[in-house]
Image (tube, rainbow, N blue to C red):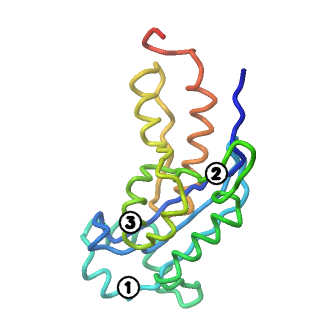
Amino acid sequence: MKGKRTVGNLLWIDLETTGLSPENNQILECAVAATTQDLDFIFGEAWLIETDVDATMGRASDVVISMHDTNGLWNDLLDPEKPKTPAASLCALLSDFARENLCVQCVDGNGPWRSPLCGFSPHFDRAFLRVHTPSFLQLVSHRNVDISTLVQLGDWWFTSPTPKQPSNHRATDDVLASIDALKWIRAHRFNPHGRRVAK
């Protein structure tokens, strides 16, 4: 018999940063999306984070400078027509998004709901959130839904590779790509067909 699910939505997130160290690098862009547990899209938002671009580029590695030059993130951060969000406001924005889209603090007969962090390698995002938005992180579950892990397992265990999702290292595009990837995995991997190994 299929078990009952606690009512609540999934929170998807992607951060673009100046490097790999949460303590020494900063968040440049953040995107979030809410879906149902069946992966129906509900709503999404994205924020460019205020920064002194010249000073930030002076501290970033050549790889990061080139990546965000190619994908247009530096240009967007420099564009006075594009709204920017103070870094200090990000925690409240994320918390409000999670509450308003029923990703946290939902309670029904099966208990409270706190969404896991969903996306490609959300442990990376969680590490930055732990340093930069710790009170938001207390709202969500300690669990992750890591699409990159599911892709790797599928490539190990199944005869056909998982289609590679394009990534331009822009937050909104990567969030949407991760949702699409999980839809494909659900349709093609969560069944016995094509497995290399016996059950």
Q: Which residue is mark 1?
A: 53
Residue 41, horizontal then vertical, whole percent: 71, 52
**Residue at the image position 36 percent from the left and 75 percent from the top:** 26
Say if 174 sits above or below 24 in the image.
above
Contact? badges 2 and 3 (CB < 8 Å): no
Count numbered badges in the picture: 3
Q: Which quadrant of the structure image shows residue 191?
A: top right
Residue 108, horizontal then vertical, whole percent: 74, 49
**Residue at the image position 67 percent from the left and 51 percent from the top:** 9
Q: Is residue 111 left or right of residue 165?
A: right
**Mark 1: which secondary structure?**
helix
Residue 157, horizontal then vertical, whole percent: 42, 21
Say if 159 sits above or below 46 in the image.
above
Q: Nearer the viewer, mark 2 or mark 3?
A: 2
Q: Earlier in the sequence, mark 2 or mark 1?
A: 1
Between 169 and 192, the one lying in front of the other is 192
Between 144 and 151, the one lying in front of the other is 144
**Mark 3 Cα-neighbour bin, 10 Å: few <14, some 14–19, many ≥20:** many
**Mark 2 Cα-neighbour bin, 10 Å: few <14, some 14–19, many ≥20:** many
**Mark 3: which secondary structure?**
helix
Q: Which residue is mark 3?
A: 128
Q: Is residue 152 left or right of residue 86?
A: left
Residue 50, horizontal then vertical, whole percent: 46, 85
Mark 1 and mark 3: span between their CA atoms? 19 Å
Q: Earlier in the sequence, mark 2 or mark 3?
A: 2
Q: Which residue is mark 2?
A: 113
Tell me the kind of residue under disc 3: Phe
